[in-house]
Image (cartoon, grey):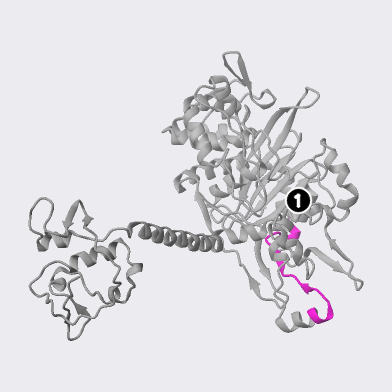
Amino acid sequence: MRERKMIQDEEGPSLFPGMEELGIGSIRRMEERKADEFEEDARFERALLDYDDDSYDDDSDYDGDYDEDYEEPESVSRKGKVLDRESERLIDGRELTAEDLKNLRPVGRGPYLFISCTFILLFLLLIGQVVYFNLYQKDAILDSPYNRRQNSLSDSIIRGRILSEDGEALAYTYSGDDGYEERVYPYANMYAHTVGYASHGKNGIESVANYQLMTSHTNLIDQIANDFSGKKNQGDDVVTTLNTRMTQYAWDALGDYRGAVIVMDPKTGAILAMVAKPNFDPNTLAETWEEMVSDSSNSQLLNRATQGLYPPGSTFKIVTTLAYMRSKHNLDTFRYDCTGIFEIGNTTVHCYKDAVHGEEDFKYAFAHSCNTAFAQIGLDTGAKALGDTAEKLLIGKELPSDLYASKSRYSLTEQSGEAELVQTAFGQGKTLVTPYQMALIVAAIANDGVLMKPYLIDHAVTPTGKILNQTKPSKYTTLMTKSETQVLKQLMKAVVDDGSASALSGRSYEVAGKTGSAEFTKSDGTVGTHSWFVGYTGGENPDLVISVLAENGGAGSSTAVPIAERILDSWYSEW
């Protein structure tokens, strides 16, 4: 084997002649390897270095450390070129040039590069998942009632209180000296569906705010003292948006009717009252649980405000009116002669109690809730425009809600036929909505088309009084334009001024709304009527939104309107 002469760079590593120009670099690391550790790329580099160059000197004192048993390969293949060791020429007979040497690159590192990139990618995905969890999923996971970690927290933490907006305790934990604990609900049935319960599973705010209630921010010194004495730490309190006075008014006004009342602030989305009947006493849940779950006739565990599905009756005329406007119809030119009956095919539509309204414009037809006029309006609007508008108003879609809310049901299509179209247009047909759904639509109207995200929990507060997790009112979506709301506001004001809700006119507060009388078939085959009223107060400076549903209460004007009147009178009499 010929010895190889090396040239020492003044400032760098030792290089063989010509290698620097070719960009090959240092061989110091190659010199330090044992010959038996060389792989294919090391043999290839050695083959290159053995290339006959004038600068090689047989008398070189190069003392590199090589294995005497090492045998040079006959040839080394790279990129389809073969270097012959005897002739030092390419197989095709052409001399090896500098350009050829540049094209000769070691191979075999590809798999290592692929594995390295794969591990880097997996690492980045893992980091991304951790960040995503902490930003978006952490609260939902921790708040889940299925999270077993929450159950273990009860061993060291006393469940925090649930408070009203005005500071009243809606739920708290009684803790005796002997370690006995009991969850207490001072208002019993009144907040059964909103506050919920914390035994037999969890429901209502007890479920939504479970993690906050079972988290303690007691100061460190007290925590250490409690740990040494075997006492539990006090959990954080949760302050709701619920107002005890407004809830009491709604509870009293609904009386013995099955149904629901919702009162909310349209400018913020805060829910001030949510009452549903029938209900239950969470204080006696253990004794009555089996009876309630087996009694399907009362459905006491059902929150009718957010989960009860009812035909909307004439409250749906708000939706039909908006669809009519959006299908390029002019409300000012509308004229209709109501005879009390509208016939289409085998279907006959009657105005409520066979009323005959005679000649009417759009405002009069809306204010007096004329079914036959809206049957014609439905035909003029068409199934597609009506369906598109209903979808834009979140009918049939998931609703923003802290508590579980049922999706409304809407089945009208362009293939449904004219009979179903006219029935749907005035609020009958197959459409079903919740009182909560209608409250959100009216809230958007009152707030110039913008629906604020509804919420029940305002903030949490530590035992030392520090406020945590303050809810900031936020926009959920825009349901309609401001110009569209101006038209709807005028129509809803006419309902109160000179229409089916005139009992609410002339008050110290300004009201606009819509009544509804929704017929349904009872279990015995007879026809009943659900009573509706939805509206808002405050005119151009909206204050409250109210939604009232009384099951089988008759006409909206005879039952739902007086319920709303009693609530609003009580509330505004305080101011």
Give the residue type at disc 1: His
- Quarter placement of the N terminus: bottom left
For this orientation, the residue located farthest to the front is 69
At a point 77% along the width and 73% down the height, the residue shown is 234
- Quarter placement of the C terminus: bottom right
**How many numbered discs, if any?**
1
Foreground residue among 228 and 249: 228
- 304 drawn magenta: no
Residue 536 in sight from this viewpoint? yes
Q: Tell whether 513 sits left or right of 232.
A: left
Residue 575 in sight from this viewpoint? no
Query: Residue 43 location, x and y as percent?
Result: 26, 64
Query: Is the residue 96 above or below the residue 567 in the image?
Result: below
Foreground residue among 37 and 420: 37
At a point 30% along the width and 61% down the height, the residue shown is 40
At a point 57% along the width and 13% down the height, the residue shown is 345
Query: Residue 497 location, x and y as percent?
Result: 61, 42
- Name the residue beneath numbered marker 1: 193
Tag 1: Cα neighbours inside 10 Å, few (<14), some, or many (≥20)? many
Foreground residue among 165 and 254: 165
- 239 drawn magenta: yes
Q: Tell whether 353 sits left or right of 81.
A: right
**Residue 176 occupies quadrant:** bottom right
Q: Tell whether 549 sits left or right of 52.
A: right
Query: Residue 255 location, x and y as percent?
Result: 81, 45
The kind of secondary structure element at disc 1 is loop
Query: Residue 429 location, x and y as percent?
Result: 62, 26
The stretch in magenta equals: 227-246
